[in-house]
Image: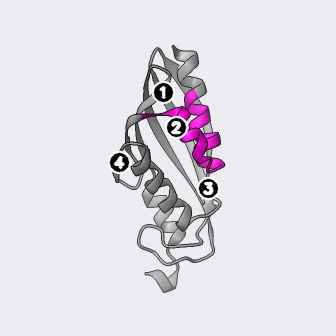
Amino acid sequence: MSDDIVLLVRRFYDRLWNNWDDQSVDRTLATTFTFRGSLGQETSGRDEWRAYRDRIRRGASDFHNEIVTLIAARDQAAVRLLYSGTHTGDLLGLAPTGGSFTYAGAAFFTAADGFLTSAWVLGDLDRLRSQLTYDGNK
């Protein structure tokens, strides 16, 4: 099973996030997928997850996830990540600055029956916020 979850997690970041591929959502996430994003919002189901992802996209249209480390055992995986993008829209309640950002994070996944069933994500929001805060946003 650990090989399956590795493929699902890689698809989650490559297709669902980095390429904004909606068709891959139904092949990757269980219908009851639960998600806790690094911004603190929790979602349930594919449509709520899409809404979360699209909210991030409105704040950073080039938002990118880089897998730094991926460890899996049976039906669980842990990932160390590097996020990056350009602040092109409202993000964390801050008006767009046009500045670029990078910050680290970690995610924990579970899978069953060929789908991701849950993800819990934690990002370094202090680092992100400090990069988005310019004199006009303080």
The reply to whether dot 1 and dot 3 touch (C-beta < 8 Å) is: no
Query: What is the distance, in whole Å, between disc 1 and disc 4 at their CAs?
Result: 16 Å
Residue at x-position 51% and y-position 21%: 72
SS at badge 4? strand
Where is mark 2, residue-wise? Answer: 26
Q: Amino acid at mark 1?
A: Phe
Residue that label 4 marks: 43
Lower position in the chain sequence, tag 1 or tag 4: 4
Which of marks 3 and 1 precedes in the sequence? 3
Q: Is residue 32 left or right of residue 21?
A: left
Of badges 1 and 3, nearer the viewer stands 1
Question: As displayed, is residue 42 above or below residue 30?
Answer: below
**Mark 3 Cα shell of 10 Å, populated few (<14), some (14-19), many (≥20):** some
Residue 29 magenta-drawn?
A: yes
Residue 115 tag number: 1
Q: Which residues are magenta?
A: 8-30
User: Any magenta on residue 21?
Assistant: yes
Mark 1, secondary structure of its residue: strand
Q: Amino acid at mark 4?
A: Thr
Q: Is residue 63 above or below residue 134?
A: above
Q: Are marks 1 and 4 in contact (CB under 8 Å)?
A: no
How does the figure colour the protein chain or chains? one colour
Spatial CA span between label 2 and label 3: 25 Å
